[in-house]
Amino acid sequence: MDTQKLVKDCIREIPAAQRQLYDHFAETMLGVCYRYTKSMNDAEDVLQDGFVKVFRNLGQYKYEGELGGWIRRIMVTTALNFLKKNSRYNHEFSFDNENLHPVADDDPEIKMTGKELADLVRQLPIGYQTIFNLHAVEGYSHVEIGKMLGINEGTSRSQYARARALLISWIKKNDQVNFKTGVYAGK
């Protein structure tokens, strides 16, 4: 795929080029959106809003780095804005400034598939889930996360540590997790 030609054709609003760009990235970006929401319907809404922003701002793409990475950043930002604006997520999308001791590096041996682990991450409270995804999956630093979410770096670190500790405790109790349904049955 000739990215430069595709982007230029999309900027000229050529429908076939826009369809090609959407088709090429939609499935991957839907996965990105789904990591931040609690339902596929919400993820699809974020995806559509994200692609509107992609096409509206494609002229700002500088051909530096991969186009997919540029689109991913837009999708992540769109998902975060969706969480902040959507009343279903507002009560869960808050952060306190309590510090937490670092989690030990004694990672449990994970005997589950990537999908099972992703399903477990999706069960975290939305604030934990968001910061875990931003740091562990997307690779943002805690400083960057703080700026994105309007929180301080320490809060990001704390929320990440709490999410990680919760996931580790669930994994250690994996005999109490029904991976077929993805529902934690812990006590």
Image: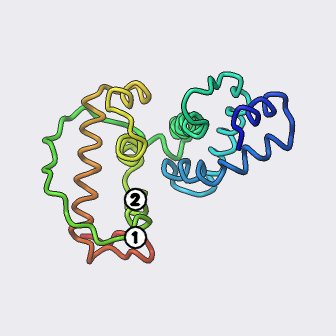
**Residue 142 location, quadrant:** top left
Dot 2 corresponds to which residue? 123
- The amino acid on which the numbered mark 2 sits, given as a three-letter code, is Gln
- The amino acid on which the numbered mark 1 sits, given as a three-letter code, is Val
Which labelled disc corresponds to residue 117?
none
Image-based side of 66 in relation to 116, left or right: right
Provide the secondary structure element on which disc 1 rests.
strand
Dot 1 corresponds to which residue? 183
Q: Are marks 1 and 2 in contact (CB under 8 Å)?
A: yes
The C terminus appears in which quarter of the rendering? bottom left
Image-based side of 49 in relation to 74, left or right: right
Reply above or below: 49 against 31.
above
**Frontmost residue, 69 versus 184:** 69
Q: Which residue is pictured at 60% across the width and 51% down the height?
A: 30
Mark 2 crowd level (few <14, some 14–19, many ≥20, 10 Å Cα)? some
- Residue 45: image location, x then y, percent: 66, 47
